[in-house]
Amino acid sequence: MAERCGRPIVRIAELEIDAFQLDSFRALLAEEIEASVQNEPGVLFLHAVSIKGSPETVRVIECYVDHSAYHAHLTAPHFLKYKPRTADMVRSLRLIETEPIVLRAKSNQHSS
């Protein structure tokens, strides 16, 4: 399927994290997400959650303006710093491409 410009890209990253390194991973993930949202105009949102009762099972929901923004994210300095620092913490990673149906959010965002 051909990539279409000008359409939001939403991906879901399914990660399994080494339980003994979970706190370190979460800190690095939070740092990377904060830098991405602050410094990359093409990042619409990045949300990270863990599965209730299974804190080492992490999901990251990513939304980018378009494919160019996603590819720019992959080469951003903060992402290139994050990947090798977390490589031995991530036991598995699966990226799921999606077809957005409806994307809506309130303008005031809350984070923990």
Image (cartoon, rainbow, N blue to C red):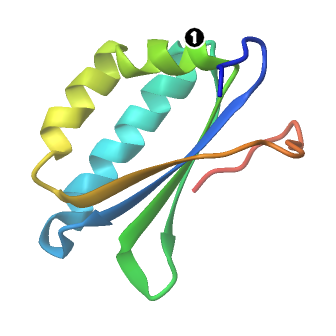
32 left or right, relative to 13: left
Q: Quadrant of residue 3?
A: top right
Q: Amino acid at mark 1?
A: Ser
Looking at the rendered image, the quarter that the N terminus falls into is top right
Find residue 45 and report its horizontal and vertical position in percent.
65, 35
Residue drawn at 48 percent across, 25 percent down? 36
Residue matched to label 1:
68
Find residue 73 and report its horizontal and vertical position in percent.
45, 19
Direction front: furthest residue: 1
Q: Nearer the viewer, residue 55 or 69?
A: 69
Residue drawn at 76 percent across, 43 percent down? 109
Q: Quadrant of residue 79?
A: top left
Residue drawn at 72 percent across, 17 percent down? 4
Find residue 27 and report its horizontal and vertical position in percent.
30, 50
Find residue 72 and report its horizontal and vertical position in percent.
47, 12
Residue drawn at 30 percent across, 66 percent down? 16
Q: Nearer the viewer, residue 102 or 105?
A: 102
Looking at the rendered image, the quarter that the C terminus falls into is bottom right
Q: Quadrant of residue 85?
A: top left
